[in-house]
Image: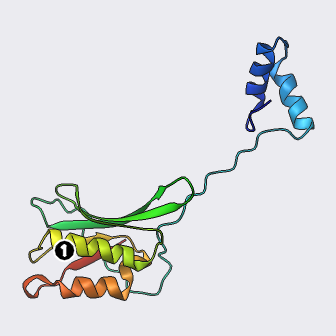
């Protein structure tokens, strides 16, 4: 058999196609005895959030919030994209009302700088008015000093961007 991950059902089907009348249970028993069962491992899924940190966690200001306009609630998150030989991470900033990406950044690492780059693009794209709520998970990227400093520097007209994590 050329295929590495043939289970007993595939082996039985292959043997039948080659003219061998074999019962699937018999194939299963023989493969089990010779330790030939196909044991697949779960795919590796990289973590995108490390919420076990000692930095400040904000209350959930977005729970139950129904937006009526743009720039009332921004949502930030990080995901990964599997490439042929590695993973890359994508940090995005979304407007919750329009559900559109308004800022993003791509990196080979999961450091705070990727989230900061996405926030910079988001802030350049939309000049937020007072009262905007910024929502993210509790990840270290959103609790780091660089991210929080950038949020504080862009306080629209004296009101701070209220950040929610959770």
Q: Nearer the viewer, residue 119 or 131?
A: 119
Q: Is residue 152 left or right of residue 146?
A: left
The 10 Å Cα crowd at callout 1, few under 14, some 14 to 19, many 20 or more, is some
**Would you say residue 60 is visible in this rendering?**
no
Q: Position of residue 42 (x, y in %)?
A: 64, 51
* Picture quadrant where residue 114 is located: bottom left
Q: Position of residue 56 (x, y in %)?
A: 38, 86
- Counting from the top left corner in percent of width and height, residue 39 is at 75, 44
- The mark total stands at 1
Element under label 1?
helix
Q: Position of residue 108 (x, y in %)?
A: 47, 68
- Asked which quadrant contains residue 133, the reply is bottom left
- Which sits in the foreground, 64 or 12? 12
Q: Residue at x 92, y 38 (%)?
A: 34
User: Disc 1 designates what residue?
Assistant: 123
Which residue occupies the foreground of this view, 32 or 150? 150
In the rendered image, the vertical position of residue 124 relative to residue 64, given as above or below: below
Left or right: 34, with 86 as reference point: right
Residue most toward the right? 33
Instruction: State whether residue 79 appears in this view.
Output: yes
Task: Tell me what residue is drawn at x 30 percent, y 85 percent.
Answer: 148
- Residue at horizontal 47%, vertical 67%? 48
Which coloring applies here? rainbow
Tell me which corner region of the image, top left, top right, bottom left or bottom right, holds residue 101. bottom left
Q: Residue at x 22, y 70 (%)?
A: 122
Q: Is residue 3 above or below residue 56?
A: above
Quarter of the figure with the C terminus = bottom left
Position of the N terminus, as image quadrant, is top right
């Amino acid at each position: 058999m050329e295929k590495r991950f043939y289970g007993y059902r595939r082996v039985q089907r292959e043997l039948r196609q080659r003219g061998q009348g074999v019962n699937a249970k018999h194939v299963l028993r023989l493969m089990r005895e010779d330790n030939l069962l196909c044991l697949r491992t779960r795919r590796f899924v990289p973590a995108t959030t490390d919420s076990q940190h000692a930095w400040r966690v904000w209350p959930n200001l977005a729970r139950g919030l129904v937006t009526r306009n743009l720039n009332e609630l921004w949502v930030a998150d990080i995901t990964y994209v599997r490439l042929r030989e590695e993973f890359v991470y994508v940090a995005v900033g979304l407007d919750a009302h329009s559900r559109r990406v308004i800022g993003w950044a791509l990196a080979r690492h999961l450091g705070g700088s990727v989230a900061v780059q996405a926030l910079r693009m988001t802030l350049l794209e939309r000049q937020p008015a007072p009262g905007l709520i910024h929502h993210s998970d509790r990840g270290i990227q959103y609790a780091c000093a660089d991210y929080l400093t950038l949020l504080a520097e862009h306080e629209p007209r004296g009101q701070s961007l209220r950040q929610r994590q959770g």
